[in-house]
Amino acid sequence: MDKKITFDTLPSAVMELTEKVDLLISMFSTKIEKREEIPKYMNTETALEYLRKTGLTISKSKLYKLTASNSIPVYKEGNSLFFTQQELDKWCEENIQIKLNKERFLSTIKKYNYGK
């Protein structure tokens, strides 16, 4: 409100202020979709769900095989397995790079073998 409020304009100023407060209340009372929080340590099911959301769909048995061969970063506590988001992200990036390099290599060999 940049205008000067006088006794005569007080009712309209209060009405304007009330409308703005009502607008603010309605804005803050609407549910803001909270970004899903990823726990620091994920169990097997949560890790599989996280990997699916990042675009890598693997089965539970495949994940267990990767952990048994120490091919994926994992923390073991008794019979439980735990994963961290940062390590899974890094592992995914490394595996994508390895896959791309393998495809380029096979493509080069194919060209060499077939003369194209």
Image: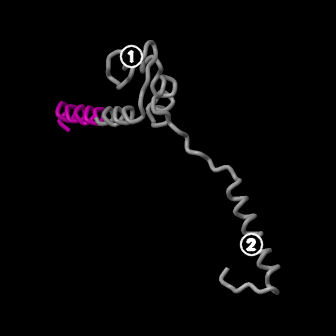
Q: Residue at x 67, y 79 (%)?
A: 1
- In the image, is 112 to the left or to the right of 102? left
Q: Furthest residue to the top?
A: 79
CB atoms of marks 2 and 1 within 8 Å:
no
Q: Main secondary structure of the magenta part?
A: helix
Does the magenta segment cover residue 100? yes
Disc 1 residue type (three-letter) = Lys
Q: Which residues are magenta?
A: 98-116
Quadrant that contains the C terminus:
top left
Q: Compared to 88, does 71 lie above or below?
A: above
Label 2, on which residue?
17
Disc 2 residue type (three-letter) = Leu
Toward the viewer: 28 or 90?
A: 28
Mark 2 or 1: the one toward you = 2
Q: Residue at x 71, y 53 (%)?
A: 29
Image location of residue 109, percent across then percent down: 20, 32
- In the image, is 15 to the left or to the right of 39? right
- Label 2 to label 1: alpha-carbon separation: 64 Å
- In the image, is 34 to the left or to the right of 22? left
Image location of residue 24, percent across then percent down: 69, 62
Give SS at disc 2.
helix
- In the image, is 93 to the left or to the right of 51? left
Q: Residue at x 42, y 21 (%)?
A: 63
Q: Quadrant of residue 115?
A: top left
Image location of residue 53, percent across then percent down: 49, 36
Q: Compared to 35, does 43 lie above or below?
A: above
Q: How many marks?
A: 2
Residue 12's mark?
Answer: none
Q: Residues within 10 Å of mark 2 (few under 14, many from 20)?
A: few
Label 1, on which residue?
65
Image location of residue 33, percent across then percent down: 62, 47
